[in-house]
Every structure is written in structure tokens, then in C-alpha cells.
Image (cartoon, rainbow, N blue to C red):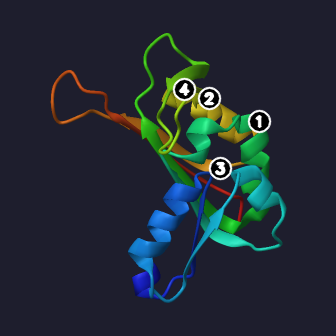
């Protein structure tokens, strides 16, 4: 999007990922990266965004009761909020523990929570937080037996 003239700000909790993104996109006009927690970053800026997108990121790892009000407050009227993450595992809804050395550079295991819900539940949560025109669905993986991808789109009222 930045290559098309759109101002883009990327936020990531991991300093390793932020540095990787800065190196990858170095010299791209309109592209900036911030290291921090999504709610804190969104709450500390007066910026208004036309779109906020989480690709297997903040929405997965942040309580929607905390994150969605921050996103809603920062979206321009009619702005788009979209996110993607792994297809939810049936029967494992709500905050789920994820444990391992999944953050690069960690020597010890780390336990974090990730939030997963069925598409209908995500739609209900978004509606409760004031979002409109909501579309939430799972796209099946091309290979049988693999998890698909949950894709969700919603708008701030115009």
C-alpha cells in the first residue's frame, strides 16, 4: 500500500520483527514501524486511520474487550477494521494458552494467550463494540487436513 502512496504504520510487539520489517522496507516512502503493544500504541496517538488490519497479530493475542474499543476510537468514519488468523479449533473458543519458544531469541518457554472464536461470535463481539457491515468467515486450506484462515472485516459507522 505504501508503494501506492498510502501512509502505512506497522506495529509489532517484537523488537526483532520491527527491525526485520524496517530492513525489508527501508527506503519506502510513507512506511513506518513502531515497536509496542497495540492497545498502548493506539491509545497514545491522536491519529485517525482509514483502515486498521491485523494479520495473525494483535487481534489474535489481545483481549478483544481491550483492543476493539482502541481500534474503534482510532478509525475514521466509515473506516475499515480487518483481521486474519488461523481457523478456530472447534470447541476451543475464547482465550487459549499458547506455550513455547515461539518468540525469536527466547531461551525459555513463554506462555501467552490467543483469542479464537467462531466467525459468528467475532461478528457479535464487533457489533457490540459499535462496528457495522461485518463479514466474518473461514476460508478452508487448499490442502486437506490443514487449518484454514479466519478473515473478518467490519466498518466504523460513517
Q: Earlier in the sequence, mark 4 or mark 3?
A: 4
Task: Point out residue 47 in the picture as x, y percentages from the top left corner.
Answer: 76, 74
Q: Earlier in the sequence, mark 3 or mark 2?
A: 2
**Residue, disc 2:** 112
Q: Residue furthest front?
A: 107
Q: Pointer 3 and pointer 2: residues touching (CB < 8 Å)? A: no
For residue 88, which quarter of the picture? top left
Tag in front: 1 or 3: 1
Q: Pointer 2 and pointer 4: residues touching (CB < 8 Å)? A: no
**C-alpha separation, residue under disc 1 versus residue under disc 2:** 17 Å
For residue 117, which quarter of the picture? top right
Q: What quarter of the picture does the C terminus occupy?
A: bottom right
Residue 109 — which label? 4
Above or below: residue 115 compared with residue 149: above
Tag in front: 3 or 2: 2
The secondary element bearing badge 1 is classed as helix
**Residue, disc 1:** 65
Amino acid at each position: 500500500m505504501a508503494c501506492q502512496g498510502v501512509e502505512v504504520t506497522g506495529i509489532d510487539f517484537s523488537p526483532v520483527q520491527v527491525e526485520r520489517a524496517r530492513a525489508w522496507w527501508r527506503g519506502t516512502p510513507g512506511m513506518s514501524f513502531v515497536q509496542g503493544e497495540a492497545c498502548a500504541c493506539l491509545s497514545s496517538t491522536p491519529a485517525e486511520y482509514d483502515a486498521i488490519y491485523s494479520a495473525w497479530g494483535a487481534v489474535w493475542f489481545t483481549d478483544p474487550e481491550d483492543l476493539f474499543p482502541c481500534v474503534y476510537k482510532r478509525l475514521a468514519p466509515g473506516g475499515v477494521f480487518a483481521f486474519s488468523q488461523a481457523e478456530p479449533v472447534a470447541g476451543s473458543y475464547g482465550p487459549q494458552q499458547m506455550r513455547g519458544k515461539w518468540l525469536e531469541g527466547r531461551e525459555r518457554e513463554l506462555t501467552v494467550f490467543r483469542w479464537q472464536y467462531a466467525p459468528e461470535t467475532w461478528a457479535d463481539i464487533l457489533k457490540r463494540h459499535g462496528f457495522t457491515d461485518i463479514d466474518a468467515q473461514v476460508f478452508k486450506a487448499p490442502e486437506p487436513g490443514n487449518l484454514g484462515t479466519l478473515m473478518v472485516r467490519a466498518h466504523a459507522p460513517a
